[in-house]
Amino acid sequence: MTIKSHQTLLLTGAAGGLGTALRQRLKDNCDVLRLSDRAADCERLGAAQANEVIVPAELADAAAVERAVAGCQAIVHMGGVPVEGPFDPILQANILGVYNLYEAARKHGVKRVVFASSNHVTGFYRQSETLTPAHPPRPDSLYGVSKAFGEDLSRMYFDRYGIETACVRIGSSFAEPRDRRMLATWLSFDDLHRLVTACLTTPVLGHTIIFGMSDNSVAWWDNASVRHVGYRPQDSSDVFRDAVYARTPEPDLTDPAVQYQGGGFVFSGIAMTVR
Ligand code: 15L
């Protein structure tokens, strides 16, 4: 059973892929689930259901973000640009936006945030390496850099103001793993909810970086040092392994997308040379 830890919980990016997956599941975590996204995207949410409130907010709009945050006790921040792309939207939503969110949290006394960071903070480590949360960032993209910024910003808000944050470096959270890489990075929607719940309910969270993955046999990340979060995945990509192998070609070991953990992100968007 899910522990109801907060009266009002804000879910940003509520109309996105992970927001959609969390919308029903997070209702058990709170009395009121406040859903926020850009105004145009909020249309996809339909009408507010029981125990829901919809508050449209552009992350780059500080006043709008403040309206979304005021009165919440905790925030699950899934909002922002979720992939590599031109810098300006990333700057607005992921850099200015995360600053606006933490400023609003500080002003309104919110003490706990679950921040959707990404595996692309460390995407330039090789697929043959096993990382802990203590490994230095090696972002594979402007998007990855923006998530690294969010991790550092949230650390500063913890050290200065005591706002606890879990930076969840989400792997690939989809209904099923889509390719061979995702056999290592897959995070089921139920495990995502288990992980967010653990971050919301553990007595002392502090500022913690944790990798968001299911209990996959092939893994590049080791969460042993963050047991205090209390996350126990119950799903595994292993059940999809044979089907994924059958429908995908043998990997080309000279392909950077196969060599590096970030997969295709290591060369998407900005022009670059990969050694
Ligand atoms: C991410 O950070 C993206 O938001 C998501 O769309 C996936 O591409 C995922 O990483 C991944 O690495 O598979």
Image (cartoon, rainbow, N blue to C red):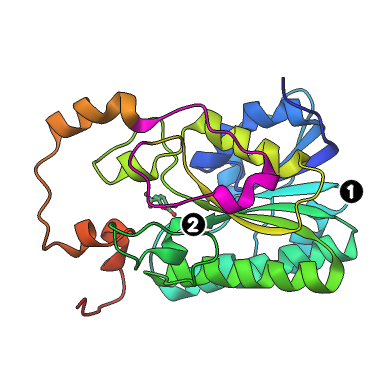
In the rendered structure, the answer to whether residue 88 lies left or right of residue 115 reads left
In the rendered structure, the answer to whether residue 79 lies left or right of residue 86 reads right
Q: Earlier in the sequence, mark 1 or mark 2?
A: 1
Instruction: Please say whether residue 77 is visible from this viewpoint.
Output: yes
* Quadrant housing residue 239: top left
Residue bearing mark 2: 118
Placement of the C terminus among the 4 image quadrants: bottom left
* The residue carrying mark 1 has its beta carbon less than 8 Å from ligand 1: no
Residue 253 falls within the magenta-colored stretch: no
Q: Indicate whether 50 appears above or below 252.
A: above
Using the image as rendered, state which of residue 32 and residue 199 is in the foreground. Answer: 199
In the rendered structure, the answer to whether residue 162 lies left or right of residue 2 reads right
User: Residue 157 placed where, x, y %?
Assistant: 77, 69
Residue bearing mark 1: 71
Where disc 1 sits, the SS reads loop
User: Residue 99 placed where, x, y %?
Assistant: 69, 70
In the rendered structure, the answer to whether residue 244 lies left or right of residue 53 reads left
Instruction: Please say whether residue 54 is visible from this viewpoint.
Output: no
